[in-house]
Image (cartoon, rainbow, N blue to C red):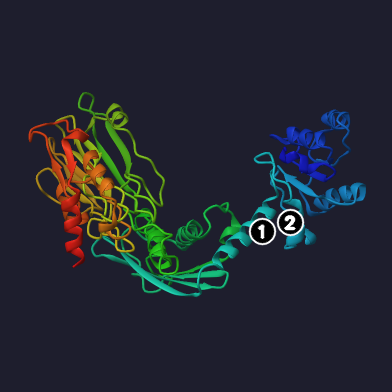
Amino acid sequence: MSELKRCAGKVVLVTGAGHGIGRSVIERFAAEGARVGVNDVSSARADEVVRAIHSVGGEAIVLAADVSSKAQVDAMFDAVLQRFGTIDVLVNNAGLIYEDRHFLDGDEAWWDRVQGVNLKGAFLCSHRAAHVRSERSMRQSIRAIPNGRYEHETWSDGFESPIRIQMAVTVRDEDIDIDFTGSSPQSERGINVVMNYTRAYASFAIKAAVSPEVPHNEGAFRPVHVTAPRGSILNCVEPAAVASRHIIGHFLPGVIFGALAQAMPGQLMAGGAEPVWITIWRGQFPQTAEPFNLTVFQCGGAGARATKDGLSATGFPSGVGGVPAEVIESLTPLVMHRRELRTDSGGAGRYRGGLGQWTTMGLNGDQPWSLSAMVDRIQFPGAGLAGGLPGACGEFIVSDGRRPQPKARLALQAGERVQLNLPGGGGFGDPFERDPQAAFNDVVYGYLSMEAAARDYGVVIRYLGQSDQLVRLPEHYALDLPETERRRRASVK
């Protein structure tokens, strides 16, 4: 049975009917026998719309097109109520603001009625209705979390010295307080975070952890209350520099998950690479001496989940994607000599952390060039969860062996290369509980070395091929289950 069958005999008010899919929505409602109030249809089209509704046996009222003031909104609703006596479904295709209308503000029973029909994509409810229902869903999900105070901390490499991100999550029935008291003071460098950015990422983290299916809107964030000391790294004051605020702000979902994991065991992901790596490459084209400037985004591994391995070379919380090597090399004289998943960078666990990347960049030319890097997790790895091990730290290395400041401009000479080896995600659960076949597959795919499989997972794998064999197929490996069982039993003792 069509979802629209549920509209038969109902009174529907369609706003913004002269735009987008409004006309088709009207006709579909009318075809199911709904009585329709139509707003925002030009006088030239009004008769046409009414005839279309009447032709399928529906009743209609065409309202004034202009509803830009409270009085006009009131008049529109009053006209429908006077004609039909009720409004069962509100389809808002115009983004109208209804908060001033007293019987629409906070009356959940009324919103239940106007939300009573789901047209699976064609139904565009009032933003106010969506806010109320999102808030209600969030509060219901929060009530499932035990009341209490849950603390956690994480560290960023910082610039001159590490940055501490200390926080506490307090669950109070259907509200959550997030407080960053104890975090480092604001920095002289451009890595400070403004309060709005802090609030946004903290609220997002709660929604992702507690009720990810709820739409992103004001209502979903009303139960979440975020505070940070004024003048701290997460609530900086002028004249603090903030251009690279992501380098700290991207840590927030992970540290909040670490706190909530105490109250929501088996539901959250381990720590990951967190901040997206941003590098700005500058130099000249060798033939023309024309300058070039290219910004590259790269992601390390995400933390393992409670039921799945972490995603490799995939950002969280940022979803920024990488640029293909072919694009980089066609737009600039840069040469990407290496780009592959970084073996052994994913933290060991029942579910493995996502892998980082090995990347090496050089310049095709004989002129000096430079790099401005904004990268993190060189010193502090993404933490494991529930017994999982941390992921690998990132690496920032010049071909002459230097490991420069990872948040500064680096002058490079012709022929030099730069390694950007991105960090991996933390593992989830005891590594010795990982399925040996999964560890075997990781070795075959190159995600895990045989040495790490034995050391971190207790899984013994034999290589049967030639030592100089470049192409190594699954049949070149063998899983030694008896020795694996012996090692795992020994580790328990």
Evaluate if marks 2 and 1 touch, with contact meaning CB atoms under 8 Å apart. Answer: yes
Quarter location, residue 295: top left
- Which quadrant is the C terminus positioned in? bottom left
Image coords of residue 420 (percent x, y): 22, 45
Q: Which mark is residue 275?
A: none
Q: Which residue is mark 1?
A: 132
Q: Residue at 70%, 42% (x, y): give it.
A: 93
In the image, residue 170 lies at what x, y percent? Answer: 48, 73
Residue at 69 percent across and 44 percent down: it is 124
User: Residue 233, image x and y in percent?
Assistant: 37, 65
| Nearer to the camera, 462 or 6 | 462
* Front-most of residues 447 and 330: 447
Q: Does residue 20 lie above or below 397 as drawn? A: above
* Image quadrant in which you'd find residue 217: bottom right
**Does residue 122 appear left or right of residue 11 in this picture?**
left
- Mark 2: few, some, or many residues within 10 Å (few <14, many ≥20)? many
Q: Which residue is mark 2?
A: 111
Q: Amino acid at mark 2?
A: Trp
- Rendering coords of residue 199 (x, y %): 48, 62
Total marks shown come to 2
The residue furthest right is: 83
Q: Residue drawn 59% across and 65% down?
A: 139
- Label 1 element class: helix
- Residue 308 located left or right of residue 476: right
Q: Earlier in the sequence, mark 2 or mark 1?
A: 2
Vertical order, 120 against 97 (above or below) = above
Residue 222 at least partly seen? no
Q: Residue at x 76, y 48 (%)?
A: 90
